[in-house]
Image (cartoon, rainbow, N blue to C red):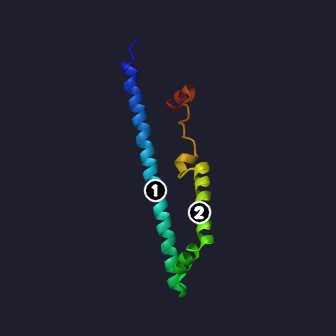
Amino acid sequence: MSRTGGGANDETVERGRTERAGEWFAESTLRIALAVFGFVLLLFALGQAVGIDLLGMVVSALSTQMGRWLLVAFFALAIIVIAVRGFGPSSSSPPEREPEREPERERNRNR
């Protein structure tokens, strides 16, 4: 038995998995970066609107030992949520299947 034909298929499947994992990682990194940037921008804008340095207050709170551990706990919680739910709607819902067509119904429609 020759195994040369199966090896090419295995490489193609593995390459597809690697590409999907790379795309998922890039997309996830971009979403996280945008969320962090949006949060910082929100704090800055709200601080400017009310005349209080909210961004500076958050930075000074996170620079304490308790603030750093709260930040670590938040990231741990985010990792747990990501592991359970995934990053996007495509990872949380099963793939949709096309409904099976009934030949009898198709024949009745064509009449």
Q: Are marks 1 and 2 in contact (CB under 8 Å)?
A: no
Mark 1 or mark 2, earlier in chain: 1
**Residue 62: quadrant of the picture:** bottom right
On the rendered image, what quadrant is the N terminus found in? top left
In the depicted structure, whether residue 35 falls above or below residue 21:
below
Q: Residue at x 54, y 37 (%)?
A: 97
Across and down, in percent, residue 64 comes to 59, 74
Q: Residues within 10 Å of mark 2 (few under 14, many from 20)?
A: few
Across and down, in percent, residue 68 comes to 58, 68
**Residue depth check, mark 1 versus mark 2: number of the one nearer the observer:** 2
Residue, disc 1: 29
The kind of secondary structure element at disc 1 is helix
Task: Tell me if 20 is positioned left or right of 57 in this view.
Answer: left
Across and down, in percent, residue 6 comes to 40, 22
The kind of secondary structure element at disc 2 is helix
Which amino acid lies under the numbered mark 2 shown in the image of this protein? Val
Q: Residue at x 59, y 49 (%)?
A: 83
In space, the residues marked 1 and 2 are separated at their CA atoms by 18 Å
Q: Residues within 10 Å of mark 1 (few under 14, many from 20)?
A: few
In the depicted structure, whether residue 32 falls above or below residue 108:
below
Across and down, in percent, residue 20 comes to 44, 43
Q: Which mark is residue 49?
A: none
Residue, disc 2: 72
Task: Tell me if 79 is positioned left or right of 40 in this view.
Answer: right
Q: Residue at x 42, y 47 (%)?
A: 23
